[in-house]
Image (cartoon, rainbow, N blue to C red):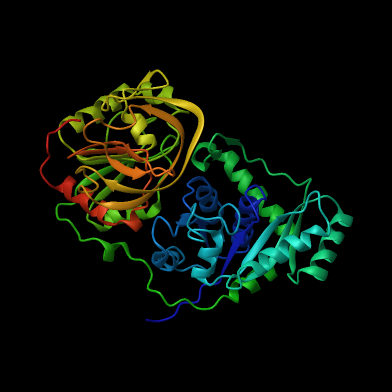
Amino acid sequence: MSSVHIPRIVIAAPSSGAGKTTVATGLMAALTARGLKVSPHKVGPDYIDPGYHGLATGRPGRNLDAFLCGPERVEPLFLHGAAGADVAVVEGVMGMFDGASGRGELASTAHVAKLLRAPVVLVVDGSSQSRSVAALVHGFASWDPEVRLAGVILNRVASDRHEQLLREALEEGAGVPVLGAVRRTASVATPSRHLGLVPVVERSAQAVQAVRDMGELIDASVDLDAILALAKSAPPLSAEPWDPAAEVSTVPGRPRIALAAGPAFSFSYAENAELLAAAGAEVLPFDPLHDTALPDGTSGLVIGGGFPEVYAAELSENAPLREAISSLVAAGAPIAAECAGLLYLARELDGRPMCGILDATAWMTERLTLGYREAVALHDSPLAPAGTRLRGHEFHRTSCDPGACATTPAWGWRTPTGAPATEGFSTPNLHASYLHVHWAGAPGVAQRLVEHCAGPATGQRP
């Protein structure tokens, strides 16, 4: 096993809202503007930030999630995504030591930084404080000796005098160098809504401008040479890069699997499609907002997450595609839908007709459902046989009635209070659920789906 040296750095913060995404995305854009090949990564199950990362670097934004994929896969997945890069930038999640609830450091930014043996730069909101910043940074630097906190970027700094006070305090009391200071008056237009930033795929020119602004802001505010020097100080890694072809067997026949994409269905891990292709499928993206038919020869369908509630009118108006999907399901073709896909397959969403494949009604709510889940498949489906155990993540502000099929729910799990719960819909040829699954953590999901697409149809309708 040979070692690989990929310069890398992790961008963390004491808490959410400190400015990690602006700094990390801006850093990626600024380094790319220097002519470097930058590999973008995000800790945790986020779909939206990686879109901005991809726009900044021209490479797919990839997630590193020790809960969904297992700690043992973090380094291999990193090496897979960073192949050929000059430097990698990893944006953290929440506060630096915040991970899966009740599981210690698991899936936290600090945990991933240790798994990658990467130096960490802490983004600190400097507003409303001066010398206290030293106590804050000292605490983060000393909390876990295995985490190498190598620098600080000050954000929301009010003035030259304020910056001087913050720098003096950190030099005196924390022993952690300041690598940059971003003024409070500096602003980047990044529109948000109920689940965070508006995804890149929806904003086009505005997203391009926002990423450009982030890059120029960080280039003017941060010592990029010092950042690169820190990144280069990370030691070589010795794991074998993750290889989708090593995770699955090739299924003969090259079945054609349609993959919903576009503004309404933009939530997908890059590794999911890579696994489908490695298992022998031809993956065919299509946009349910505009395409009135499925790709020719479609033998299976994957509809991932996104924002169908934002585009309910347009999705409903595209009756030819809704009818085509209903016909595909009626013919027994395998269908895998998660979150947004579940809503699209329902009878209606916010009062507008959807595909009508599931006898369920969905609507937008004010309540955010969020969290990791440890699930077991309760019935056979195209994704998993009954009894399969895997980890997933919920992230939505919609509700569905019923939330699970009365006779064949997709998943079962325990709520935080320990009560049993069921969720989703399953038949031998359909799986629909709110649960997001990173298939790199359960590659058998992709293998089974491709096998079902290549085999005889079941003809069973949910």
Q: Tell me if residue 144 comes above or below residue 49 in the rendering.
A: below
List x then y, in percent, for residue 333.
18, 38
Please state if 178 lies on the left or on the right of 54 as rendered: right
- For the point 76% across and 47% down, the residue is 186
Q: Can residue 37 be seen in this snapshot? A: no
Left or right: where 181 falls relative to 290:
right
Q: Horizontally, is 106 left or right of 162 in the view?
A: left
Residue 45 visible within the image: yes
Q: Nearer the viewer, residue 398 or 57?
A: 398
Residue 159 percent across, percent down from the top left: 86, 52
Rendered location of residue 56, percent (x, y):
56, 53
Residue 206: x percent and y percent? 60, 39
Residue at x-position 33% and y-position 48%: 375
Identify which residue is drawn at 22% across, 50% down. 387
Q: Quadrant of residue 334?
A: top left
In the image: residue 313, left or right of residue 359: right
Residue at the limit of the structure toward the front, as seen here? 418
- Which quadrant does the C terminus fall into? top left
Q: Nearer the viewer, residue 65 or 57?
A: 65
Compared with 231, 163 (above or below) is: above
Identify the residue at horizontal 45%, vertical 57% (top origin). Answer: 65
Residue 238: name its quadrant.
bottom left
Q: Quadrant of residue 139?
A: bottom right
Q: Quadrant of the N terminus?
A: bottom left
